[in-house]
Amino acid sequence: MRKNFEITAVHGREIIDCRGYPTVQVDVWVDNAVLGRANVACGRSKGTHEAFELRDGGKRYAGFGVRKAIDNVNKVIAPEVMSKDVRDRRKLDKLMIEMDGTENKAKLGANAILGVSLAIARAAASSLGIPLYKYINSNAYILPVPMMNLINGGKLTSNYLDFQEFILMPVGAETFSEALRITSEINIVLRDILVEKYGKLAVNVGDEGGCSPPMREIREAMDMLVKAVEMAGYANKVVYAFDIASTGLYDKRTEKYAVEGRRLSREELIELYKELVTSYPIVSIEDPLYEDDFEGFATLTKELGVQIVGDDLFTTNTKRLAKGIEMKAANSLLWKVNQVGSLSEALDAAALAFRNGYSVVVSERSGETEDDTIADLAVGLNAGQIKAGAPVRAERTCKYNRLLQIEEELGPVARYAGKNFRQPF
């Protein structure tokens, strides 16, 4: 363990994510010797209530540059956190939030603040000589169930599927490493049967690595997933989930949802979900209704009896989550650190969810990098569930490979959440 925990340098730079869009990378140095580095993930499908992601505008990178956010890291934030104790993570997060002074981090940019926040956490863990998951929680021991979206639709790809993610969950595995092997084997089979039925273009992938076959119907996608699972020999180990991203399907003027060429009311959409849950072993549905429909979420949560995950509904924000808890809207929090813009605030949201019986799903974004931080955070929270995309491409697989390392590090202490993914501890 080091004796000196003073922050001696902070430096931000512009890098690109897996889609070729610019994003923020921050280095925090402690005692001129220990480095904490963090990349900020970016979403394509965003909730209205997310913290503000500062972009440059103009022609450069089609307006998506982040030089303004980088300047805020290097010229505004860095001088204020220099010489501070890196272990004072919460105090430093609070300092940056107060420096910004806006409700949604619009002045400095959530991407600037979060980059520094995560880099500080990484630097603190390294300075203490412990992995990040142990820095977050000394009693971290649960390996999460991977929620693998093997077929992509919606804004993640260019096919005609309205639902954004068709997911399988290997809850019947005994260990995380077995769960990863199962999903990878299923993905291999799925790609083969998609090519056989639709041709080679069917296995082009979407933003999060899932296949993008030329489909239109929800049941067609589900039937192909079920077929792949059965052919791989894992029907008794796998259940299914959706991410609907329904705000993108919703027309505020008509209060209808566009699904498979139809215009459905809230009540009609809920009936569709009931039919799907009856037809397939679906255990989780994310963002099934419009992002501000707390009343509809409450009705659906009561009537459907499965995990209902709030993403755009909550945006990892304690105020919105508290409202959902009060109204019994949803029963699970999708946890994305960049939605709220600092690690401390995100951890507060997870704690609030757990205290009120809500499960927590740690999630990536469509615009990811080779940063594997969320793997440590998922274990640090003992969350029991992680969404990191399909088991392909380095920005996805680095998270899963990090979880394999953590499983090995924990040894006999490690426990795979499995069928207890909603309440793993």
Image: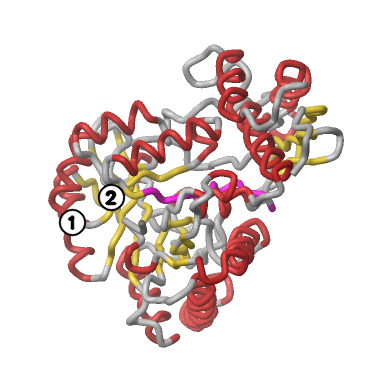
Q: Nearer the viewer, residue 172 or 299?
A: 172
Whether residue 323 is visible = yes
Q: Residue at x 72, y 24 (%)?
A: 73
Q: Position of residue 259 (x, y in %)?
A: 29, 52
Residue 302 lies left or right of residue 207; in this view the side is left
Q: CA distance from mark 1 to mark 2?
A: 8 Å
Task: Name the kind of residue labelled 1 in the image.
Answer: Gly
Q: Quadrant of the N terminus?
A: top right
Residue 408 lies left or right of residue 164; in this view the side is right
Our reading of the magenta stretch's main secondary structure is loop
Give SS at disc 1. Answer: loop
Q: Which residue is mark 1?
A: 305
Residue 351 lies left or right of residue 137; in this view the side is left
Q: Which mark is residue 308?
A: 2
- Asked if disc 1 and disc 2 are in contact, CB closer than 8 Å, the reply is no
Relative height, residue 318 to residue 267 (above, below)? above
Relative height, residue 26 to residue 201 (above, below)? above
Q: Position of residue 383 (x, y in %)?
A: 43, 53
Q: Nearer the viewer, residue 123 or 185?
A: 123
Q: Residue at x 16, y 49 (%)?
A: 268
Give SS at disc 2. Answer: strand
Magenta part of the protein: which range?
Answer: 360-370
Q: Position of residue 237 (x, y in %)?
A: 36, 78
Task: Name the kind of residue labelled 2 in the image.
Answer: Ile
